[in-house]
Amino acid sequence: MTGLFDLLLNWRNRRLVDPSFQNWAASFPLTRPIAQRRAREVFDLTAGFVYSQILFACVELRVFDAVKDSALTVPALAKKIGLPESGTDRLARAAASLRLLEKCGQKYALGHHGAALFGNPSVFSMIKHHAALYMDLSDPVALLRERTRDTALAKYWDYTAGGSAEYSELMSGTQSFISEEILSAYSFDQHTHLMDVGGGVGAFLCAAKRKHPSLKATLCDLPNVVALARAHFIEQNIKADAVACNFQTDPLPFSADIITLIRVLHDHDDEVAVSLLGAIRAALPDSGTLLVAEPMAETPGAEPTGDAYFGMYLWAMGTGRPRSLEEIRELLRHSGFAHAKEIKTRRPILTRVVIAR
Ligand SMILES: C[S@@+](CC[C@H](N)C(=O)[O-])C[C@H]1O[C@@H](n2cnc3c(N)ncnc32)[C@H](O)[C@@H]1O
């Protein structure tokens, strides 16, 4: 079977690299749309870093803010964003081609993608922090040759420093979509005490408490982050405990009947992940539940998010990897969880959810 598959793959690839086949496919009416779409996809792959930097410039210069209420001419936009008119004109045209802006006569308004991003300010912090990843990816071959923690992204996410306000704020900002996905996929009604391990400043616990007010809630994180979480709970008027705990060295408190691990597992290499899951197993009663939520590798329709984006992101961070559903199940089995099943989310590109017992 493999032999036949290899033969077919080789045959297809020999056709695809052949310039006369490419010319034929681009002219033949039935293959022309496919050839055009493939050419566009290949060009997008080649130019993707430019598109990202156009988006970065728009966010940095607050271009979407500038045009959100009314469309602006280039001179008016230039005045608002503090760039010369020639640079503004070049950026506005580029942004319009990417549907970040939309050209209306001589003016520019928010485009489809610009409007979607504007409704979601936490994505702006995410785009801004990509400056660190962009720096690390400037020589991808060197980055891949030897994994190191001497990268801009590793410095940004320095858990060993005891938790940072900057990364915590970024995670909290992007948490609202994730919370919505988890809370609509899984009902916490059947539980009495939820503990969120690596819970950051508590954005998920606040959302869970709003939906299930009778649930007892505890957050565990590194000491600096726990201090931020306590302040956040007071500010949000949410009754929840926050326990300082380093899950790599300390046992986890035993009192919850459900533990959540949201966007935590993929940050860690297998050895730490297995020890963390073992500590969770020990902190749960036999009838307890673990909920793991994170974006995963090999997610149908979102393969580049898991394998390309998070793959390179976590490599640059110097620890962790995106895992496929099956790899997570395997880690869970290895750590003493007998049943692990996926609960479908509406947007698996953002997060998938596995329930283990
Ligand atoms: C990527 S953030 C996810 C935060 C939150 N769960 C969310 O989805 O927004 C990872 C969290 O794990 C915490 N963390 C990392 N290493 C830890 C450790 N050894 N012990 C406890 N918490 C840790 C970090 O401080 C951070 O809050």
Image (cartoon, rainbow, N blue to C red):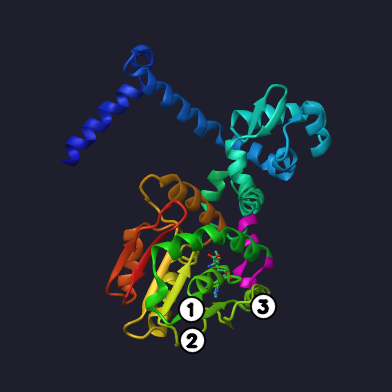
Near mark 1 (Cα within 10 A), the count class, few <14, some 14-19 or many ≥20, is many
Marks 1 & 3, CB-CB < 8 Å contact: no
Q: Earlier in the sequence, mark 1 or mark 2?
A: 1
| Residue holding disc 3 | 234
Near mark 2 (Cα within 10 A), the count class, few <14, some 14-19 or many ≥20, is some
Which SS class for mark 3? helix
Q: In which quarter of the image is the C terminus?
A: bottom left
292 relative to 112, above or below: below
Residue pictured at 54% horizontal, 68% vertical: 207
The spot of residue 236 in percent (x, y) is 64, 73
**Residue type, numbered disc 3:** Ile
| Residue holding disc 1 | 195
Tell me which segment is drawn in magenta. Answer: 152-165
Residue pictured at 73% horizontal, 35% vertical: 70
**Residue type, numbered disc 1:** Met
- Give the spatial CA distance, label 1 vs label 2: 9 Å
Residue 244 occupies which quadrant of the picture? bottom right
Q: Is residue 5 left or right of residue 70?
A: left
The spot of residue 56 in percent (x, y) is 66, 42
Q: Which of marks 2 and 3 is in front?
A: 3
| Residue holding disc 2 | 253
**Residue type, numbered disc 2:** Pro
Q: Earlier in the sequence, mark 2 or mark 3?
A: 3
Marks 1 & 2, CB-CB < 8 Å contact: yes
Query: 207 or 331: nearer the eye?
Result: 207
Q: Which residue appears farthest toward the left when viewing the image?
A: 1
Q: Which of marks 1 and 3 is nearer the N terminus?
A: 1
Q: Which residue appears farthest toward the bottom when viewing the image?
A: 254
